[in-house]
Each structure stands twice: as C-alpha cells, then as structure tokens.
C-alpha cells in the first residue's frame, strides 16, 4: 500500500504514450484539468527543501524486518513515479517501508536555483531527520546514486546502507544525450504546443527511442493557458549540468564504512573499471554487481536488479 505526502495530496497525473503515440482519453483529460496549477514555489539553495514523496508500506501490520526504511532516489529528469513497481516489491518482500522521493527541481517538489550534490543531499538528510527519524537504506540511480553517495559521506549516522545504481564517485562528463534532452524539452516548452502527441513527434527529432521519449514526457503538464510545459525546472537544470557531472568530495577526508552495493550496467559507461579503486577509497565495504544492461538498469533488467538488492539487504552485515 502506498500514500502521497500530505503537503500535496492530489491525484497522480500520468501521461501514457503508447508505441503508436495513442493517449488514453480519460487520463489525458484529467491531466489537462489537474496540471494547470502553479509551479512549485522556488526555494533557496541554502536551506533544505520539503520533498514530495510516495510511501509504500509493507503488507503486514507486524513488521519483523531488521531492514530499515528504504529511500529511492530517481535520476535526472525522473520522478518518484518511475520505480513504483520496484518500491511495492521491496516493501512487500523486505517487510519495510519504502519512500520514493521527488528530488528538488523535479516532479512535485519545489524548484531552486541551486542544484548540486550538497544541496540535493541536504534535502534528503532533512527528509530522514524530520520524516523517518531513524537510519535508512538509501538507493539511487544515476544523479540519485551520486546523491545517495553524498548523503552517506556527509551523514553516515542516518545511513544504514547505501546502494548506487550505475554511477560512480568521480567527476565524469554526462553522456551527450543528457544535454540534448534538456534542450529538447526547453524548446518544446516555448513552442506553445497543445498536445502531448505533438511533443512526442518533436522529440523524435532528438531521440528515436520510443521508450525514452515516453520517459521524458512523463514530466509534461499543461500550463494555465492550455499549452504544454514541464514539471521539471528546465532552466535550473540546464545551468546545473556541470555540477551534476561532478562529485565534490575527497576520499582522503570523506568515507562511508557502512555496507555499500554498486550495481552497474555493463553496456553503460558511467562506472568504468578505472573507477573501481576510487569507489573502494570512498566506500571500503562496497560490493560490485554487473548486469547486462545500459544506463537504465532498473527498467531494462528489473528482475536481476531486484534480486541483487534483496540479496544484499538480507545478507547479515558484520
């Protein structure tokens, strides 16, 4: 069972675009009706942001699990909606509460000009301190993985264990597709389009993959004037791309000695073999698991991903 955060209790808006770009009419109408609200209020980068979230509770009322709450962090241009089936599975099989967060500048969470890993980590730390109030498992993919690492290094007292999916604690240029996607969405935002189908067609000039176009368009919403816009703070993210590629920590000063799992896609370039010694300096108790997948490991190979995570969390840690 899962719940929405109390601060923005409303129906989830989903845009479903099929391989033929056919929208469910009722969902489309509901999205138009609900998405004309104002954008989340801007927030200062010097203070934590109250993040929006989904909560997935275990199926039993008596929780015997020795696994702490799990926090799931999405990647760039993602949201708390991305991994709901995985979150449900973890809550049920691991008998613990799972929280999927919208990071700042994404989904329903507030926007802020500052978007680097210290700011992202501060928000997650505040969520744990004020909402969960106990050490938690932090699991993140891509940008969310580096955010999870940052929290573990900054606040090991609130991290039971850390799981990083297809990213490494290194400075590394983003894949060329990422700036392209941000620019594509910024262009669409200014076009005054009236339908998601039109946006889908425009995205085809930038990206041939139907799955990726569908993923990008989960951020779509209608503005008050009826034209298509996006929930993500595109201008803030465009300015922050350099920061998103960085990792602003020093392994001589910053270490997390708790249990750590790294999962990488072997057809992705985000965790090269050359980065493994660096991982060990930051996270000396790390385990590395490979999956035959690209960067989108969770959606490409969900069963393997789930098995690795559940085995890791069920294994007693010395």
Image (spheres, rainbow, N blue to C red):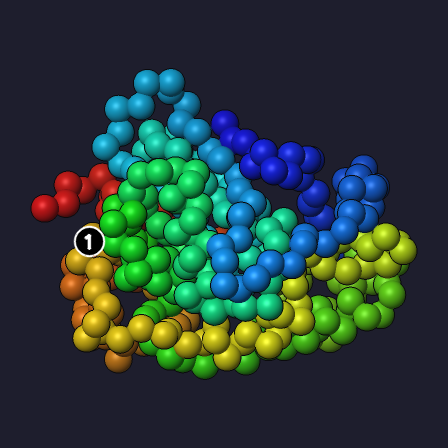
Whole-percent x and y of residue 227?
A: 86, 58
> Which residue corresponds to the image point at 64% horizontal and 34% vertical from the top-left?
9
Q: Quadrant of residue 12?
A: top right
Q: Could you tell me which secondary element the residue under label 1 belongs to?
A: loop
Residue name at image x 42 percent, y 41 percent: 130
Q: Quadrant of residue 177?
A: bottom right
Which residue, as the protein is rendered here, is positioned at the far left?
318
Instruction: Indicate the position of residue 43 as horizontal and vertical percent values.
Output: 60, 58
Q: Position of residue 138 (x, y in %)?
A: 35, 50
* Residue at 41% from the left image edge and 59% from the top image edge: 121
Q: Position of residue 187 (x, y in %)?
A: 76, 73
Compared across the picture, whether 254 is left or right of 228 comes to: left
Q: Tell whether 308 sits left or right of 225.
A: left
User: Would residue 165 be seen by someone viewing this image from the given angle?
Assistant: no
Within 10 Å of disc 1 (Cα), the crowding (few <14, some 14-19, many 20+) is some
Q: Residue at x 32, y 43 (%)?
A: 136
Q: In screen coordinates, is 261 left or right of 318?
A: right
Q: How many numbered marks, from 0 up?
A: 1
Nearest the eye: 22 or 7: 7
Position of 285 with respect to 143 (left or right) is left
| Residue 186 appears in the picture as rendered | yes
Q: Quadrant of residue 168?
A: bottom left
Q: Which residue is mark 1?
A: 258
**In the image, is residue 119 above or below residue 31?**
below
């Amino acid at each position: 069972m899962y719940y929405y955060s109390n601060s923005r209790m409303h129906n989830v808006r989903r845009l479903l675009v099929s391989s033929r770009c056919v929208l469910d009419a009722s969902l489309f109408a509901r999205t138009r009706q609900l998405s004309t609200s104002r954008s989340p209020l801007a927030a200062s980068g010097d203070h934590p942001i109250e993040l929006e979230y989904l909560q997935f509770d275990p199926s039993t009322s008596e929780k015997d699990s020795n696994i702490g709450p799990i926090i799931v962090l999405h990647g760039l241009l993602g949201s708390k909606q991305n991994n709901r089936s995985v979150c449900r599975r973890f809550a049920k099989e691991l008998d613990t509460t799972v929280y999927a967060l919208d990071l700042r500048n994404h989904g329903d969470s507030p926007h802020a000009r500052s978007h680097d890993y210290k700011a992202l980590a501060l928000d997650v730390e505040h969520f744990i301190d004020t909402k969960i109030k106990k050490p938690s498992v932090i699991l993140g993919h891509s940008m969310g993985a580096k955010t999870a690492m940052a929290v573990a290094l900054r606040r090991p007292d609130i991290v039971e264990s850390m799981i990083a999916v297809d990213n490494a604690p290194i400075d590394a240029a983003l894949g060329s597709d990422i700036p392209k996607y941000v620019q594509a969405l910024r262009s669409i935002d200014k076009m005054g389009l009236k339908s998601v189908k039109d946006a889908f067609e425009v995205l085809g000039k930038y990206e041939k993959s139907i799955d990726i176009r569908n993923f990008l368009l989960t951020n779509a919403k209608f503005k008050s004037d009826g034209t298509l816009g996006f929930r993500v703070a595109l201008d803030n993210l465009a300015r922050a791309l350099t920061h998103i590629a960085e990792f602003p920590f020093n392994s001589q000063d910053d270490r997390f000695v708790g249990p750590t799992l790294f999962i990488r896609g072997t057809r992705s370039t985000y965790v090269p073999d050359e980065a493994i010694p660096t991982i060990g300096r930051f996270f000396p108790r790390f385990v590395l698991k490979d999956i035959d997948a690209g960067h989108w490991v969770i959606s490409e190979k969900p069963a393997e991903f789930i098995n690795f995570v559940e085995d890791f969390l069920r294994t007693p840690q010395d």
